[in-house]
Image: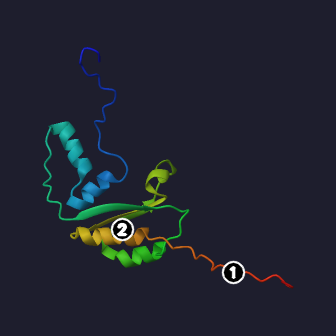
């Protein structure tokens, strides 16, 4: 304001959106929603955050062709894959039509798995055809 005061335009006093809360839960083996209610009702957060896992969300869009099929992702990632589901059309444009949540004690393995899930098939480019010489030239 002209007098130097501030006027808040928006306040988000809620847990974050998307799959973020799920990743909090999977990274820490806690129930964030229970702790959120605990904060609202009792004013305290009782869970111990040790973050034993690196955790990531990776999304895919239907318009792309990926090197690994959905079934191959499920098979290859095994216990690292803690959640997967189709995304609502409202969120799909931003975070993908289908999402996977991965976790592992090793951040490097999580990053490598995310890259594998995201790897696209490179379309083959046809080799240029040799030009024919004009007849009678």
Residue sticking out furthest to the bottom = 136
Q: Position of residue 111 (x, y in %)?
A: 30, 68
- SS at mark 2 in the image: helix
Residue 122 or residue 70, whichever sits in front: 122
- Is residue 88 visible to the viewer in this orientation of the structure? no
Q: How is the image coloured?
A: rainbow
Judged left or right of residue 136, residue 37 is left
- Is residue 90 visible to the viewer in this orientation of the structure? yes
The residue at which mark 1 appears reads as 129
Q: Position of residue 3 (x, y in %)?
A: 25, 14
Q: Residue at x 29, y 22 (%)?
A: 7
Report the disc number at residue 65.
none
Judged left or right of residue 130, residue 103 is left
Q: Residue at x 35, y 60 (%)?
A: 57
- SS at mark 1 in the image: loop
Q: Spatial distance from mark 1 to mark 2, Cα to Cα?
A: 38 Å
Q: Position of residue 119 (x, y in %)?
A: 44, 71
Task: Locate the N terminus by quadrant.
Answer: top left
Q: Position of residue 113 (x, y in %)?
A: 34, 71
The residue at which mark 2 appears reads as 114
Q: Residue at x 24, y 54 (%)?
A: 31
Q: Is residue 68 above or below residue 37?
A: below
Residue 88 or residue 9, whichever sits in front: 9
């Amino acid at each position: 304001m002209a007098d130097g005061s501030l006027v808040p335009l928006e306040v988000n006093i809620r847990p974050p959106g998307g799959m973020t809360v799920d990743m909090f839960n999977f990274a820490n083996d806690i129930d964030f929603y229970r702790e959120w209610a605990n904060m609202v009702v009792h004013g305290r957060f009782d869970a111990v955050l040790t973050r034993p896992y690196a955790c990531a969300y990776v999304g895919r869009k239907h318009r792309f062709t990926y090197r690994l099929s959905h079934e191959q992702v499920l098979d290859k990632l095994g216990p690292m894959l803690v959640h997967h589901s189709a995304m609502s059309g409202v969120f799909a444009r931003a975070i993908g039509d289908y999402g996977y949540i991965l976790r592992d004690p090793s951040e490097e393995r999580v990053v490598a798995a995310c890259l594998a899930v995201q790897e696209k098939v490179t379309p083959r480019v046809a080799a240029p055809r040799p030009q024919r010489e004009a007849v009678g030239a």
